[in-house]
Amino acid sequence: MQWLGKNKDGYRGERIEIREILSDALEAARKHGWQIETLAAAPGLILYAVSRVIPTATRNIYLSTGIHGDEPAGPLAVRQLLQEDAWPAHANLWLCPCLNPTGFPLNRRENAGGIDLNRDYRHLESPEIRAHVAWLDRQPAFDLALGLHEDWETHGFYLYELNPDNRPSLAERVIAAVSRVCPIETARIIEDRPAQNGIIRPQMDPTQRPRWPEAFYLISRKTRLSYTLEAPSDFPLPTRVAALATAVNAACNQGPITPSPVLYARG
Ligand SMILES: [Zn+2]
């Protein structure tokens, strides 16, 4: 598997046409009977949330992506997952397919106003996150929350686990599944935190942190088990999409792990 070495001081890889990707994702959701909600963040600024609630559900799962406009693999993976429609049978699902629609056309992490939305969940300074949090607060508690991201500096896939009650961890099974389609980051320190085989388990108290990522909000108010999934964005885009889609399937489907049909040899 080739590390491309393209990303010099930021993401320099493929871009996506976010409107097109979102439109495909919503169409797939509609086709498979999901409910689509539009969240009006500001005039001309709309976020989407899609959900599938079924009477036989035993679990509530939440997913989000596209909060950083220079991380195209997340919205692509979510589109693929909605099109494949291979979700677990007994789960309710809530999914935000793109939280930063103004960042993607600029290929930049922040929104068009220069705010890193994934640091805005404590003070709610941006219209996007105000709308998102208002929507989140109307939803039930989640048994599992997954955030799909990319990291332009890493040499492999890794994840953050927030699991304050020491529930059965999904981290090892996610890493095992992803390792079949994408290299895993083996560094012992990732983003200044101790890591083991691509797993970071930060010990931190959100109340001590001035600026909250989405995961802190979720772990404080909505869930007790959260994963932030980080694909290595200096690898070919199909590999990163496969890594994220495989990670979601491994986390959501509790049965035996099946490899994603997209193998990284293709990248
Ligand atoms: Zn990110």
Image: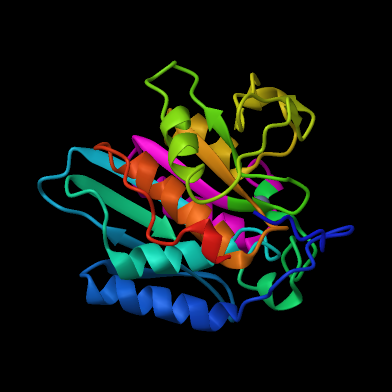
Q: Is residue 262 above or below residue 44?
A: above
Residue at screen point 88% across, 59% down: 8
Figure colour scheme: rainbow
Q: Quadrant of residue 6?
A: bottom right
Count of marks placed on residues: 0
90 or 129: which is nearer to us? Answer: 90
63 or 217: which is nearer to us? Answer: 63
Q: Position of residue 172 (x, y in %)?
A: 46, 28
Q: Quadrant of the N terminus?
A: bottom right
Q: Position of residue 210 (x, y in %)?
A: 75, 33
Q: Quadrant of residue 237?
A: bottom right
Per the rendered image, the range of residues in magenta is: 119-148
Q: Position of residue 227 (x, y in %)?
A: 51, 37
Residue 262 in sight from this viewpoint: yes
Q: Residue furthest right?
A: 9
Q: Residue furthest left?
A: 56
**Can residue 128 be found in the magenta stretch?**
yes
Residue at screen point 45% across, 46% down: 247
Q: Is residue 252 above or below residue 49?
A: above
Q: Quadrant of the C terminus?
A: bottom right
Q: Is residue 185 above or below residue 237?
A: above
Residue 97 in sight from this viewpoint: no
82 or 119: which is nearer to us? Answer: 82
**Can residue 185 be found in the magenta stretch?**
no
Q: Is residue 226 left or right of residue 156?
A: left
Q: Position of residue 78 (x, y in %)?
A: 44, 63
